[in-house]
Amino acid sequence: MNKTPVNKVSKVARVTRFTRALSYFDKDPVYKTDDYIAPRLIPARYKFVVRNPLTRFIYRKRLEGSGVYEYVTARTRIIDDIFRNLSTDIQQVLILGAGFDSRAVRFQDSLRHAAVFELDSPATQQNKIKRYRQMHIDLPSNLKFFSIDFHREGLPQSLDAVGFKKNVPGLYLLEGLIFYLDPAAVDSIFNCISEYSGKGSTVVFDCLFASVLRRENLCYGEKRCYEFVVAEGEVYRFGIEKGEMPDFLSKYGFRPVEEYDAARLEQLYFTDANGDTFTRVNGMHTLFIAEKT
C-alpha cells in the first residue's frame, strides 16, 4: 500500500484532530484534554458529533477494545505538559509531521522565547492554515510553516531555507509520525536532529514495537488498530524491538529520559484510588522523551 500522497490531507491526521476535539468536550475528567483549538479545526458537519453526549458515546464505543482513545488522550496530556512548562533555555521548537497540532497557538505564551517551526506535507499543512484563517485564529509571529515530503526531500536543506539554527537547545516533536516512515527516512530525520540540536535539546516521539510490523498481535488493541490504519490508507513502516531504544538513541547522541508504555500510562491516568486499572491503553506504542548528551 502506498503512503499518503503529498497532495492529499492525511486521514490519520484528521482522525487525530477529531479525537482531540472529542476529548475536549468529554465530561469524564479521565479523558478530557485541553485542546480547545481542535473543535474549531474540524469541518462544521462534525461539530455536532463532538458536542453531543450521545454521539460522543457512540464514537467512543466504536473505539472500545483498541485502547486508542486512551492512548491519544494520555499522549496529548503528556506532550501538552512539556509545552506548558517549556524551559526558557529552549531557543527553537520543531514540530515534524505537525498535522493539526495546535500547540504553537495554545501555548504561545510558554513559547514566546523560542522560534517555532511546523513541518508537514503540503496538502495537510495548507488545509490546516486554511482552517486557521476561516476560524479567525491569530497565529503567533514566531511561528513558521514549511512543507516537505519526508521520502523525497532533504530535511537539512528545508531547515536551512527557513532559518533554523544549528547547535542551539531545541525541542523536537515527532508525535504519531515515525512509524509511518521508511527506516531510511527515520534515520535521516534523527541524523538531522543530531546535527542541528545543541546540548540540552529534547526530542519527544512515539514509536511502535517491531513485532507490530510482523503482525504478531502481542499487544492489546493491536489487531483493531492495525486494521483501522490500513483502512484509512496508511501503512506502518517502522518499529523498534523492545529494549533497543537506548541503542537507537545513542547513535544520534541522545539518551532516554522518560518512557511511557501502555502499563505506565494506565498507572498514571487510568487507575482508581484502590490501585485498580479500569481501562486499557493501546499497547502497540511507547512514548519517549530523550535528551542530547
Image (cartoon, rainbow, N blue to C red):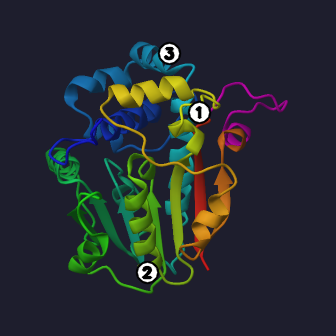
Please tell me which residue lies in front, 137 or 91. 91
Q: Residue at x 67, y 49 (%)?
A: 242
Q: Residue at x 50, y 15 (%)?
A: 61
Query: What crowding class fits label 1: few (fewer than 14 Cα within 10 Å), some (14-19), or many (20 or more)?
Result: many
Whichever of callouts 3 and 2 sits on the residue coming sooner in the sequence is: 3
**Helix, strand, or loop for circle 1?**
loop
**From the viewer's perspective, is the residue at label 3 or at label 1 nearer?**
1
Give the dominant element type of the magenta stretch: helix, strand or loop: loop
| Residue 270 drawn above or below residue 254 | above
Asked whether, in this view, residue 7 is left or right of residue 48, the answer is left
Which residue was labeled with disc 1?
A: 282
**Helix, strand, or loop for circle 2?**
helix
Q: Quadrant of residue 52?
A: top left
Which residue was labeled with disc 3?
A: 61
Asked whether the viewer can see residue 20, the reply is yes
**CA gap, disc 3 and disc 2:** 45 Å
Kind of residue at disc 1: Asn
Number of residue marks:
3
**CA gap, disc 2 and disc 1:** 33 Å
Q: Residue at x 83, y 33 (%)?
A: 275
**CA gap, disc 3 and disc 1:** 15 Å
Please tell me which residue lies in front, 91 or 167. 167
Q: Position of residue 292 (x, y in %)?
A: 57, 77
**Helix, strand, or loop for circle 3?**
helix
Asked whether the viewer can see residue 109, the reply is no
Q: Which residues are magenta?
A: 265-281
Kind of residue at disc 2: Glu
Whichever of callouts 2 and 1 sits on the residue coming sooner in the sequence is: 2
Q: Position of residue 93 (x, y in %)?
A: 40, 70
**Numbered badge on residue 178:** none
**Numbered badge on residue 195:** 2
Quarter of the image containing the C terminus?
A: bottom right
